[in-house]
Amino acid sequence: MTDAERLVLPDSLSAPVAAEVKRYGTRDVETGGFLLAPEARPMCVSTVALAGHNGVTRGRGIFRISGKAIDRLFGWAEVAQLRIPAQFHSHGSEAFLSCVDRRDGFNVTEFISAVIPQYGDPPMDPHTWGWWQYDGDEWLELDPPEVIAGSVRVVVFDEDGVRAHG
């Protein structure tokens, strides 16, 4: 991946993502969401979409989003002229891609998947999260994204649609 294709995160993204991961992690379940970027700068994340409830299944070692919930988010993103270059989800211990993650993840060329470890007390620094990119055949480990000063918009999505967080 060239620097022009490298994912860039605003420094304000870590706090809401880590808080959401911890909120569910203290219940001993996984959670996750997607990272969105403007069409004009498709690798510069401006929005984080946290998974809501309707059509979302969480458990220990389980995080699934229904096709309808994903369709709601992707439709909203298209109207808002946003791209979705990456997803994230949490694990109870280490940051790794499980067999299920590798088989059932978004196996789309150039798509990025992040795993946030230790969901009961997740690290805030995205450099300590695990990062992978699908090359068309397999998931390859990536260097962490660049983090720059900036703000992030936080939304929640599920089968009911997309709405502001909080």
Image (tube, rainbow, N blue to C red):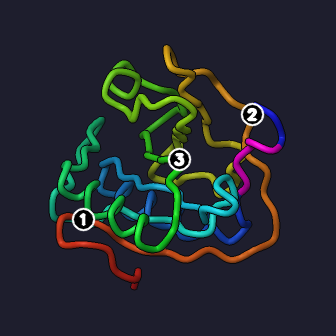
Q: Which residue is mark 3?
A: 86
Type of residue at label 2?
A: Asp
- SS category of the residue bearing label 1: strand
Q: Choose the circle earlier in sequence order: 1 or 2.
A: 2
Nearest to the eye among marks 2 and 3: give it. Answer: 3
Horizontal relation, residue 113 to residue 6: left or right: left
Query: What label does residue 143 carry, if any?
Result: 2
Residue span colored magenta: 4-8
Horizontal relation, residue 61 to residue 17: left or right: left
- SS category of the residue bearing label 2: loop
Q: Choose the circle earlier in sequence order: 3 or 1.
A: 3
- SS category of the residue bearing label 3: strand
Q: Which residue is mark 1?
A: 158
Type of residue at label 3?
A: Ala
Is residue 152 inside the magenta stretch?
A: no
Q: Quadrant of the N terminus?
A: top right
Measure how far apart labels 2 and 3 are at the Cα level.
Answer: 14 Å
The residue depicted at 30 percent of the width and 48 percent of the height is 29
The residue depicted at 28 percent of the width and 44 percent of the height is 63
